[in-house]
Image (cartoon, rainbow, N blue to C red):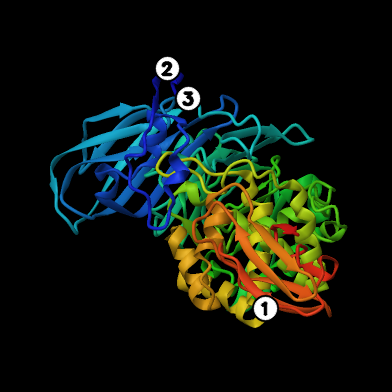
Amino acid sequence: MINKLAKILLFCTISLPTGVSAQLMKAKELFSKADSLRGQLTPYRTCYDIKYYHLDVKVDIENKHVEGSNLFRFEAVNDFNKLQFDLFENLSVDKVIYQGKELNFTREYNAVFVDFPNTIPKGKLDSFVVEYSGNPIQATRAPWDGGFDWKQDSQGKPWVATACQGMGASVWWPNKDHQSDEVDSMLISVAVPKGMMNVSNGRLVKTEKLKGGYNKYHWKVRNPINNYNVALNIGDYVHVNEIYQGENGPLTMDYYVLRENKDKVGHLQKNARQTLESLEYWFGPYPFYEDGYKLVETAHLGMEHQSAIAYGNRFGNGYMGRDLSGTGWGLKWDFIVVHESGHEWFGNNITSNDLADMWIHESFTNYSEALFIDYFWGKEASQTYVNGNRKSIKNDIPMQGPYHVNKEGSGDMYPKGGVMHNMIRTMIDDDDRWRGILRGLNKEFYHKTVNYSDIVDYVSKHSGINLSKTFEQFVQHRGIPTLEINVIPEKNIAYRWISEVEGFDMPIHVSLVDGKKILLKPTQDFKMLRAPGVTKDNIIVDTFNYYVGVSIQ
């Protein structure tokens, strides 16, 4: 764990990506050296590009212990003789092996620095192996905290899973633990006690019987995958599979549930098929056909582990039987199936370079819930659901977090993020174009990592609206803008935005006098509009779809 005595103050000396306001770092937050070692891209991390991992680990469930190795295959981005990988300090680095020899290394908190005997030249493909062991951190409230979730099923059999988003995959296995570098492909080999099964990402390619009462499961991931998505799921599982005729052809769909729940698989199948049908329509083809689609039952609520989604919603609709929107629409489908599957597009296909931009993952995925409703019950139902989610918005801190310290922004990235996308859709007022933007994002940034500007620039360009100030207000600030309208009785209105964002401009729909909808384009300077017969009582601002304050005088 982080040594609290090592807390230091990070000042705003680090460079921020283009378009990121310096206000994000003006609060003098305390971050530890461990945070910056995990969050910053130093030369010891940017010097190499990960191409392939082979994680080979044995899980001793009785002693809550892991031991094994990870092969790092990489390409040198520039000449170097020292690099950093990551592994939490409570786990032991037993050996670092390069070309058959052990290398010297040092540790600083959760970072490991390896010295190579000779300079590795730019462009060289090379590899090393890390052997490690220990008792990984035990998650006390997975998936909201990270580590191993050691549980038992109702029959008293082991039921184990990993979840580590935010905390980082190095909480349980050695890797280059930064979201910006996704490994191109991976083999995950996990040895578990006889009678148990391990389910990981990708496709099962081999099962081995080992001495000592263990079986090893080998899972091959053929698509790029982010470290935090790599998962172990160990239990007495029953496997059900089917083929879904998707946009890119046949897609294998696999369901792994506890033996005691084998009669409940139908619920997952129905919801998964509906989810893929609707989200392929809105977002484009499922991004990981080569690795298949899986739902794996876990003791924790859920997590978007790529091609092996963790599911713990008890085979019911809603969010643990509740409708978070309070509208009734959230009880017509299984929240975890839809939400976590939505992450296959936003979070797994498109991944933020820095945890600060986790809002990219969660805002679009929150909105995917509304699009699911739209596909089956229509746009009005979808917008009602989004509007109902507003009650969860706190407007406490920005949705975007501080860069380079492995910290996300406000939890508002879920409901407020979904509200923002519905608002942008309303501004565009062309659902075919909006659908094209969502599908285009997943095509343009297919299997890529992105930053704030990538998303803002793409949506602005393809919507035909400069949305830079809209994103700045709703993502980088905690508050919302206010539309001020001054009425000159029965003649004109003067209108403008009041916003903390300099130069804020955002189109908004209003109705005047006769109820006909028009699109205003206010700025922070008053504009005049002739509106014969206008009064304060016959001005209607679309606050159902626009999350703004309104002042009419």
Q: Residues within 10 Å of mark 2 (few under 14, many from 20)?
A: few
Q: CA distance from mark 3 to mark 2?
A: 12 Å
Q: For the residue labelled by badge 1, is the local secondary structure a helix, a strand or a loop?
A: loop
Query: Do labels 3 and 2 touch, CB within 8 Å?
Result: no
Q: For the residue labelled by badge 3, is the local secondary structure a helix, a strand or a loop?
A: loop
Identify the residue position indicated by label 2 in the image.
Answer: 5
Which disc is residue 322 wearing?
none
What residue is shown at x 71% (from left), y 68% (from top)? 371
Image quadrant where residue 70 sits: top left
Q: Which of the pair 528/484 is nearer the observer?
A: 528
Q: Residue furthest top?
A: 5
Image quadrant where residue 486 sits: bottom right
Look at label 3 and name its amino acid: Met
Identify the residue position indicated by label 1 in the image.
Answer: 429
Identify the residue position indicated by label 3 in the image.
Answer: 1
Disc on the earlier residue, 2 or 1: 2
Q: Nearer the viewer, mark 2 or mark 1?
A: 1
Q: For the residue labelled by badge 2, is the local secondary structure a helix, a strand or a loop?
A: helix
- Where is residue 189? Give x, y as percent: 47, 47
Image quadrant where residue 396 sits: top right
